[in-house]
Amino acid sequence: MAMQIVMDHSGDSRHFFDNCNTEALAEAERRFLQFTLKGYTAAVRNGPGEVIRITAFDPTAEETLFFPRLVGG
């Protein structure tokens, strides 16, 4: 089962989906676009302590992380 983790000011939310199910994949891709269009950075865990930034939905990713844009001031 694959997972998308969305980080925000309140912590994180986790969205699990079966990447063998076409409807679940379509929903996961919609969620990917929703957050990246809002300015979130998407990254995939590549190994222990390793993440790689991605700019397109990866249906084979076991875990995708979404980080909000940092605002300084």
Image (cartoon, rainbow, N blue to C red):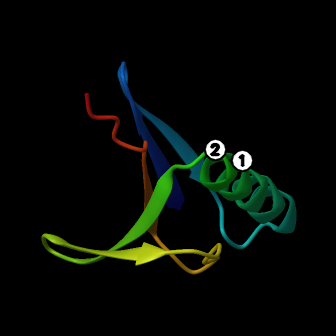
Q: Specify the quadrant of the image occupied by residue 68.
A: top left
Q: Which residue is drawn at 65% across and 61% down?
A: 18
Q: Which amino acid does label 2 sit on?
A: Lys
Q: Residue at x 42, y 44 (%)?
A: 69
Left or right, 17 with respect to 65, comes to right
Q: How far apart are marks 2 and 1 (CA)?
A: 6 Å
Q: Is residue 69 above or below residue 63?
A: above
Give the percent coordinates (x, y) of residue 60. 57, 81
Give the percent coordinates (x, y) of residue 19. 66, 69
Label 1 belongs to which residue? Answer: 34
Q: What residue type is labelled 1?
A: Gln
Left or right, 12 with respect to 23, comes to left
Left or right, 30 with respect to 39, comes to right
The outermost residue toward the left is 49
Q: Residue 38 carries which label?
A: 2
**Viewer-nearest of labels 2 and 1?**
2
Left or right, 71 with respect to 23, comes to left
Give the percent coordinates (x, y) of residue 72. 27, 34
Q: Which mark is residue 70?
A: none
> Label 2 neighbourhood size at 10 Å, few (<14), some (14-19), many (20+)?
few
Q: Which residue is drawn at 65% across and 72% down?
A: 57
Give the percent coordinates (x, y) of residue 12. 38, 32
Q: Is residue 43 above or below residue 3?
A: below
Image marks 2 and 1: residues in contact by CB distance under 8 Å: yes
Q: Is mark 1 on a helix, strand or loop?
A: helix
> Label 1 neighbourhood size at 10 Å, few (<14), some (14-19), many (20+)?
few
